[in-house]
Image: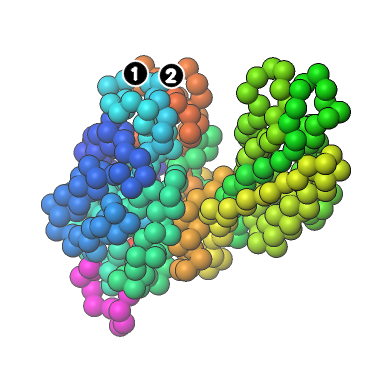
Amino acid sequence: MRSIAAIAEKHAELTAIRRDLHAYPELAFEEHRTADLIANKLLDWGIEVHSGLATTGVVGLIHGKHRPVRTRLLGLRADMDALPVQEQNTFAHASRHPGCMHACGHDGHVAMLLGAAQYLAATRDFAGTVAVIFQPAEEFGGGANVMLREGLLERFPLEAIFGLHNMPGIPAGSFALSSGPVLASNNEFKLLIQGKGGHAAMPHLTADPIIVASQIIPALQTIISRNKPPLESAVISVTTMLAGDTFNVIPDHCMMGGTVRAYTTPTLDLIETRMREVAEMIAQAHGASSVLEFNRIYPATHNHEAETNFAREVLKKLVGPKRLLQQSPIMAAEDFAFMLERVPGCYAFIGNGDGSHRLDGHGQGPCLVHNSSYDFNDEIIPLGASYFARLVERWLI
């Protein structure tokens, strides 16, 4: 790993911050302790602090020592919320908040951005200003969109923005990125099947909503295989189904729910339309009816080509071309997408390794994000911080 020497010297300090955050995780819009820790660190390093966007968001402004030819402002973003997961790890920095855990590495993202901020505040070897943005509620609540609605870009008119997420399975010391779609949109649906209940021994007198639901579920998959273009990726997953209260009664309704993922709006529009049509027709064929509630939560994350190429060149110099991978699009979602809809930028991935970094006392599961045995790889903190710092030094010239 080719971390900046001055950042590598702070490795122990940054690791201690990361593990403290891991031990005291906080859910969406409840990151008060986390926000206070961040703000206090920034103030200690002589950084101008703005707090309170989206309740717990923190923005630090670091002004370079070189005079730019025009006003310039670059954004770096880290998310800071945890997940409602009961941690299975038992090492010393395991979560002390029951049912809450940093299972996605946002504690590490905060530590990396703090490391960059500390270095940039000490050197200020750039022309312009960098905004280090610590965002709440990525997992639930769309904190990025809330910050935007509350005036993030009006107060801090960014010319570009960069984000970074750890990725288990990619070797530590490596990065992955690509232009275009890298993460899918996140959409949730509820489908109510209204039938007619009755005695389970006399089904001919009912309109059984469970039968209707059981036919709708596989029919929804034909939208993916037969309605959308084959080269357009998308997913429909039914993840919940609630119906009935006892063994000898056919219920009068059934509620299904799940998620839809896609990379483009036309594909998503098609899926929503066809889901409604398929459910209605199957329900009508059985003497029932259907009502679809379709909620578009996060848009797809699309990296801008010029900014992605810029980040790629920065990374080539930082880790070398052999440690720079092409990131294939995945169906997970990210609310950084809202920021990329408003500001050009790039969302890259830093390798978190294969899990062998975990200390004794980790759970038995794999070291994957959203897993109760996950832990961020502290060895990559200086490298991620160095990437953020080099972006600033080479953008603001």
> Residue 101, which numbered label?
none
The residue beneath circle 1 is 90
Q: Secondary structure at mark 2?
A: loop
Residue type, mark 1 in image? Thr
User: Where 23 falls versus 60 (above or below)?
Assistant: above
The residue beneath circle 2 is 363
Near-viewer residue (253 or 58): 253
Q: Residue at x 82, y 26 (%)?
A: 203
Where residue 93 appears, as percent x and y from the top left, is: 28, 26
Tell whether 236 sits left or right of 93: right
Tell whether 60 sits left or right of 366: left
Q: What is the span of residues highlighted in magenta in the rendered image?
A: 63-72
N-terminal of the pair, mark 2 or mark 1, is 1
Near-viewer residue (364 or 383): 364
- Crowding around mark 1 (Cα neighbors within 10 Å: few <14, some 14 to 19, many 20+) is some
Q: Residue furthest bottom?
A: 69
Total labels: the figure holds 2
Q: Residue at x 35, y 53 (%)?
A: 135
Magenta stretch prevailing secondary structure = loop
Residue type, mark 2 in image? Gly
Tell whether 58 sits left or right of 169: left
How far is disc 2 from disc 1 in space, using C-alphas?
7 Å
Tell whether 176 sits left or right of 248: left
Q: Secondary structure at mark 1?
A: loop
